[in-house]
Amino acid sequence: MRPLLLLTNDDGIFAPMLGALADRLAALGDVLVVAPERPRSAASHAITLHKPVRAKEIAPGRWSLSGTPADCVYVGVLRLAPRPPAIVVSGPNDGYNLGSDVYYSGTVAGAVEGALRGLRGVALSVAPRAKDVATALDLATAIVAAALTQLPPGEVVNVNLPGAGETRYAWTTLGKRRYQDDVTERHDPWGRPYYWIGGGSIGHDDVPGSDCNAIADGVA
């Protein structure tokens, strides 16, 4: 019997790279897609406990869920999958998940939720505005194929792809990515304050062997 691959993401069910990766993964086994109905970036490992989540099959084997990436894996494994998945693949995220990003990332959380359920987990992220998405997704597919046979159940790998046609890769440790931390106060039309959280990346610490350094060198 062909292995079952459960695919999720945090960019939402209609993210272009999700469908493109699902099509490629079909060469490796049967693919079940369960992804959030809308973008859920930075959802981390949140599980929805205070309200129901609803699933809708938008195409055969492709479901949208009104929850987080972790919800998608939880419901996918326990309710929607016809048999136990061999692996949970989360992504591809549109943008890197490097260093401390992994603690906020819904993409990484999807893979981790699979590992918590005794499955292999692969989190995939691609450079923002990647120039060569096709090569990145081909490499991602090759990594998933290797993980199916070489990654022990219950373990996770976090993969970042430069998206510039590069196929080299390296095993790394988590680096330190720097952000312009910011909370901006603004006012609505009634004069009431509201806050906009977060700022953009401003680089990374130079840590040899880290994921940040590898990406800076153009290595996955």
Image (cartoon, rainbow, N blue to C red):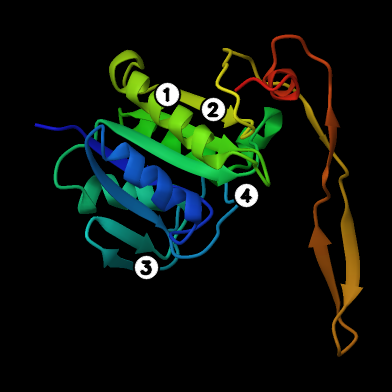
Q: Is residue 48 above or below residue 105?
A: below
Considering only vertical position in the picture, is 54 above or below 45?
below
Q: Nearer the viewer, residue 173 or 133?
A: 133
Q: First in sequence: mark 1 or mark 3? A: 3
- Is 175 or 50 nearer to us in this picture? 175
| Percent coordinates x, y for residue 175 in the rendering | 72, 21
Residue under circle 4?
42
Measuring from the top left, give residue 25's x and y in whole percent. 32, 38
Residue 91: where, in percent of width, then height?
Answer: 48, 43
- Seen in the picture, residue 189 relative to 96 is either above or below; the reply is below
Answer few, some or many: residues within 10 Å of disc 4's Cα (few below 14, many 20 plus, some between 14 and 19).
some
Residue identified by numbered label 2? 159
Distance (Cα) linking label 4 and label 1: 24 Å
* Residue at left offset 46%, top offset 62%: 14
| Mark 1 surroundings within 10 Å by alpha-carbon count, few (fewer than 14), some (14 through 19), many (20 or more) | some
Residue 52 disc label: 3
In the image, is 164 to the left or to the right of 28? right
User: How far is the residue under mark 2 from the one under mark 4?
Assistant: 17 Å
Secondary structure at numbered mark 3: loop
Q: Name the spot of residue 111 as percent of width and height, x first.
A: 44, 35
Counting residues from the start of the chain, the first of labels 3 and 4 encountered is: 4
Q: Quadrant of residue 150?
A: top left
Gap between marks 2 and 1, in whole Å? Answer: 9 Å
